Image (cartoon, rainbow, N blue to C red):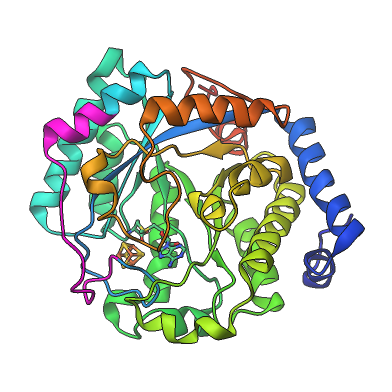
Amino acid sequence: MTVDTKEDIKALLSAEGDRMTDLLRRGLQVKLDHLDNCVHLRGLIEYGNVCEKNCLYCGLRSGNGNVARYCLSDEEALGCARLAHGLGYGSVALQSGERTDPAFIDKIEYLVREIKKIDGGSLGVTLSLGEQSEETYRRWFEAGAHRYLLRIESSNEELYYKIHPRNDKHSFRRRIDCLESLKSIGYQTGTGVMVGLPFQTLDHLAEDLLFFRRMDVAMVGLGPYIPHPDTPLYRHKDIIPSAKDRMDMTLKMIAVLRIMMPEINMVAATANQTIDPQGREKAIAAGANVIMPNLTPGEYRESYFIYPDKACVKDRPDQCQTCLDIRLAAIGHRILYNAWGDSLAFTKKNGTKSQ
Ligand code: SAM
Ligand code: SF4
């Protein structure tokens, strides 16, 4: 299967029936050949849902008045990290709405330093806190964070502005600059897109995959778009592909990307499981190798309402873990506990040791 040109990629993304099954099998085989059957965990801490931005698809947007806003206390956030360590997760991921005020920046720096004190720095730290200045990214990196996820959402500028307001706060150019800053600082940098957006075409999706390769990122998170009723993009919900088609396209994107970039880390996003009960396992079986189980304290989970019917909102972390172990064993995979699970693409290039 050749993946050199946009036409090659579009042909693969068009696969259906037996051809699609072959593609997904190939994605899995490439992963097993270059990596292994291990799945890495990032305990997800949804730190807060206050957001300065107004992305047209997201329930946390500042313009949505129907959200009870929260921010975890230090003790709650650090409790989640200790829980992750106790459960044997090698890493945590701190995610939140975008805030750029000095109090927030200081607080994240403090929390990262405190998380790194747990058991002598045994937890890896991924951040997903949106667009920040280069100085902020550097401060958080120096505090001990080593991976950063910032989805480009769509690599096509025209489509980007159909799903974001066209203003300085939502600049496509700035988002790319942020990704460049993160890479130059030394983060394992991840990006990604939503699949099945209104107005998105096969060309856009093929361009997204080429964008990931051109940016030479270490990690990618791909997931289906899920319309949220309290957002402006919801009015286009009738022109998007069905849930099954969004799921199938996400799986094909994962498989093609695994063939294109065999050694990167790829997240099986929770959104997959939201539109298909087997969604995360299907993503793993198509080439993804990272899962982010939710560790956010129960009382806040429903307020981190990015999109409706989020999977596992009511599960306790220990239940989630048993369920994951069983589900992954059923597809010939196993969780690698007590390891950071760094991106091989990154560690090889930078001559660092994989942890
Ligand atoms: N604020 C940070 C940012 O935007 O990078 C991190 C949190 S944000 C909620 C994390 C991701 O949620 C976004 O990158 C976006 O792709 C995804 N997301 C938001 N709304 C979504 C929706 N309606 N359907 C699927 N994914 C969505
Ligand atoms: Fe805020 Fe991120 Fe949602 Fe955009 S995607 S509104 S930046 S939380």
Where residue 293 sits in the image (x, y, percent)? 44, 37
Residue at coordinates 40% horizontally, 67% vertically from top-left? 175
**Part of the protein shown in magenta:** 60-80
Residue at coordinates 55% horizontally, 75% vertically from top-left? 197
Q: Quadrant of residue 169?
A: bottom left
Is residue 287 found left or right of 137 in the rendered image? right
Name, please, the residue furthest toward the left: 103
- Foreground of the two, 310 or 80: 310
- Where is 328 relative to 103, above or below? above
Is residue 348 found left or right of 291 in the rendered image? right
Q: Is residue 110 magenta?
A: no
- Where is 346 relative to 91, above or below? below
Is residue 130 found left or right of 213 in the rendered image? left
Residue at coordinates 22% horizontally, 64% vertically from top-left? 51
Is residue 276 found left or right of 93 in the rendered image? right
Q: Is residue 73 magenta?
A: yes
